[in-house]
Every structure is written in structure tokens, then in C-alpha cells.
Amino acid sequence: MKRILQFADSLATSNGGPARNSFELNRALNRVSDAAVDLVWFHGAREESVLADCPSPSATPDRPGPRRFRPLGRRSAEGELDLLALTRALWRCDAVIVHGFYLNWVPPVLFAALVLRKPVVLMPHGALTLYESSKKASKKALFRRVLNPLVVRAVRALAVGSQREAADASALLPHIRSAVCGVGTTLPELPSPHQFNIPLQLLTLGRLAPKKRVDLAVRAVAALIARGVAVRLTVAGVGPERRALGRLADELGVKDEVAFIGEVSGSAKRSAYLSADLFILPSEDENFGIVIAEALAHGLPVIASTNVEAANIAGDGAACLLDYVDEEAIADAAIELSTHDRRVLSATARSAAEERFDWDRVASLWLSLIEGSRAKAR
């Protein structure tokens, strides 16, 4: 039986897409192949991770389930790997998947894989887009310059979520092939679709960071009310913008129409999606945007900027794409969508998720990439 060993920085729910992606990919690869796929992560407690909401199937010797690496000098806990056990796992595996790039554990993992002659597929999770590379550009350029010889020798391919990310990554690491594997999402069972609520229920979900431009969603609430539209916005997530967004809602006189519900997961997250009419993500940059795939999987039409790659992948039928994003454009899109049959929109959204973001499809692309990398390494 082939063995694949994955490495992730964290499975914490606060880590967003990378945590969810590495965990769901692990489950999908184990489900659709005869390979035994293990997952090791470095930071964050199990109780604060995606494992709390999505427990893995019963562990077996071949498939022990995700485990945290235990640093030297720290007392071992159940389900953790020490350095010796991790070395054994690396020795036994046939291929390595690394999630992340500008992280302190990536160089030693790549070096160990190189020494043990294990092919590596690396998923940068947007770290190599031109947008992200422009932040702290000097430090990141130095990191790449120092790490480049090791990366070129150890990494057989980059797995990315979109064509745009592939182009950006190839510009920074031209000697390594980039392959679009996409990102998947769970396809839950859905209740019968309903018509639009009154007031219109809007939802945005994710880390409250400046680039997400959640402020535009809050401003859109004021714009809609000014046009006589009854509306309510739910903001799910935590982050550095939380206080500023609260002040903005107060200044615009819409604090009663904007609900900040904090970080959600499990049944609370599902309830947030199912209670909404429209999902909004006006981000300045998203190399993918897993929340778009999740919203579509819950039958939720989306309004997003063209900078959100998952919305571009979903297509016009399921996503309303905005070239220029401000509060008036979001308000226009919300009013336009609300004139359509909500049940038809829901069916279109779900169909897009099934066609483009099904995990079994994504896992099959990963397996093909891994097999090609193994063949290249021989």
C-alpha cells in the first residue's frame, strides 16, 4: 500500500482555509484511493482545531488519523508524534505533501524529504501570489532566495487552487511545475429551498482582515436601507477589523441591522449558511476563497469581487461577479438577485458546487499529480 504523509502548520479553525483544506484533503485521499494518508500539524491544540467538528474515522495502524508533532522537551500527549516517530513516518512514506511556504518548519521538512528521496508536492495556499508577495516583500524575497536551491531539488510540483495562482507561482518559482488541483468542500444534505426572506438576509463569513473588505458589506446595508430595502447582515468571524467594523456600523446607523456573531463552526456554521439569502465576499484578493465553495454547497448565491478565484470558477450563473466593488455595486447586485426565483438560484449554486468543488474530484486530481511526481523522482 502506498503511503502519503501530509504536513500542515495548523488545523486550528482560526487558520481558515488552509486548515480545513489539509484536513478535508486527508479524508478525501483516504476515501478515494488505496493509499494510507497521514496528516501531521505543528501548532494549535486539538480542542481548537477542525477535528473538534469533523472527527476522523476510527484510527487504524495504517490510518492513524491526524496527529500533532510534539516539540522536544514537551510532555507527550495522546495522538502526538515525537521526532523519532516522525522520522519513521517519513522513512516509510512514498510521497510528501507540504501545506504552506513561508513557515519555519518547511525547510527542515523539505531537507529531510530530499535526503530520504521522497518526492514533495507543495501547496502554498496563496503564499506565492503576487498580492501576498508584495507584503513584507524584502523578507519574502530573501526567504525564497535562500530556500530556492532546496525547493528546486525537493519539490516536484506545486498544487494550487486556480489558474491565476498557478501563473503567479510560476513567476516566482519558474523551475517548478504548477498544477491546478482546486479546493473541495463538503456537500451537505439540504432542506427544501425557500424564497427570499424579509428582511433580506446577507451573510459574510471568514477572518475579519483588511483585505476581505467586510466594511463594504456593512456600507451596503446602509445603501440598501436608503433605497427602502429591509435587510440584515450577519458577520461571522474574528480578526483585527472587528472593532473598526462595529464602529462603522454604529456611525452609519445600522448597528441594529448588522449582527457580529464571532467565529462559527459545526452546526452553528451550517445554520448561518442555511439562514442566509445571499453570501457576500468583496475581497481585494483571494487565491481561492473556500467560503465561496461552502456557500454554494449550501445552495447560497454569492456576490463577490472578480478578485475571488472560487467565484470566477463557479461561473456567472451561481456567482454575481463585480469588477468594481463598492457599497452601491453590492446593493445593486443584491436587489437584482432578489428579483429572481430563490429556488432556481439555490439549485444553480448547488449544481456549481457539485460540478467544481466535490472533494472526490479534487482528490483524484491530487492523486494524478502525486503519481506523476513519484514517476519523475524515479
Image (tube, helix red, strand yellow):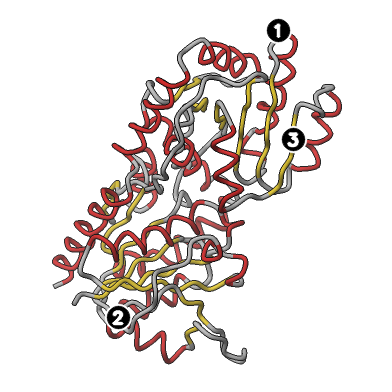
Q: Amino acid at mark 1?
A: Arg
Which corner quadrant holds the N terminus? bottom left
The secondary structure type at the circle numbered 1 is: loop
Residue drawn at 70 percent across, 30 percent down: 215
Whether tag 1 and tag 2 are in contact, CB under 8 A, the answer is no
Question: In the rendering, which numbered label is found on residue 62?
Answer: 2
The secondary structure type at the circle numbered 2 is: loop
Question: In the rendering, which numbered label is found on residue 259?
Answer: 3
First in sequence: mark 2 or mark 3? 2
Which corner quadrant holds the C terminus? bottom left
For this rendering, which residue is in front, 291 or 259?
259
Image coords of residue 321 (percent x, y): 46, 22
First in sequence: mark 1 or mark 2? 2
Q: Which residue is mark 1?
A: 227
Q: Is residue 358 above or below residue 307?
A: below
Dot 3 crowding, Cα within 10 Å, few <14, some 14–19, many 20+: some
Q: Amino acid at mark 3?
A: Ala
